[in-house]
Amino acid sequence: MLGGSPADIRADAARVRAHADQTVDAAGTALAAAGVEWVSTGADRWRDGLSEQRTEVDRTAEDMYAAAALIDHLADTLADGAIDAFGVARGFAEGAVGAAQGLGKKIGGLL
């Protein structure tokens, strides 16, 4: 749940970014297996599938980074005093974090 001061909200954005970084790192580790010398049609299909999964992980990480940017924007907006409806803003930010968490779970299923 998001809440608190703009600094608290920025910390939430940093956590989302860190999760995206970990996702990219885990995908890189999994892709290290793509270089294994294994020659067969099954191996070719496996490597193709691994490549497709990497593309999906990259898209998911991009979405997580975008969610973090939105959370940062919310913190900036609150710090500037541009909005008074903190409850509405918090709901928006919680939705962004929820989306990022959902993407993280999706990545877990890919790896």
Image (cartoon, rainbow, N blue to C red):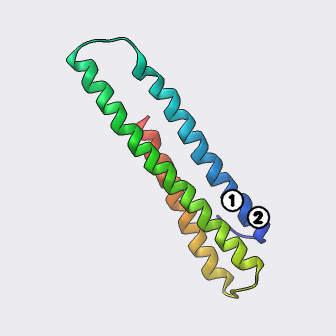
Q: Quadrant of residue 52?
A: top left
Looking at the rendered structure, the secondary structure element under dot 1 is: helix
Looking at the rendered structure, the secondary structure element under dot 2 is: helix
Q: Compared with residue 4, is residue 15 higher up or lower down, i.e. above or below?
A: above
Q: Quadrant of residue 57?
A: top left
Q: Compared with residue 52, is residue 35 higher up or lower down, i.e. above or below?
A: above
Residue at 78% from the left image edge and 71% from the top image edge: 5
Counting labels gives: 2
Q: Which residue is mark 1?
A: 12
Give the x, y percent position of residue 78. 72, 78
Give the x, y percent position of residue 64. 54, 55
Asked whether the beta carbons under mark 2 and mark 1 sit within 8 Å of each other, the answer is: yes
Q: Residues within 10 Å of mark 2 (few under 14, many from 20)?
A: few
Three-letter residue code for mark 2: Asp
Residue at 61% from the left image edge and 63% from the top image edge: 69
In the picture, the disc for residue 8 is 2
Horizontal placement of 12 versus 48: left or right?
right
Residue at 79% from the left image edge and 66% from the top image edge: 7
Horizontal placement of 29 versus 53: left or right?
right
In the picture, the disc for residue 97 is none
> Of 91 and 13, which appears nearest the observer?
13
Q: If the image is split into quadrants, where does the N terminus sit? A: bottom right
Give the x, y percent position of residue 110. 40, 38
Q: Residue furthest left?
A: 41
Q: Compared with residue 110, is residue 1 higher up or lower down, i.e. above or below?
A: below
Q: Residues within 10 Å of mark 1 (few under 14, many from 20)?
A: many
Q: If the image is split into quadrants, where does the C terminus sit? A: top left
Residue at 42% from the left image edge and 18% from the top image edge: 35
Give the x, y percent position of residue 66. 54, 60
How far is mark 2 from mark 1, CA to CA?
6 Å
Three-letter residue code for mark 1: Asp
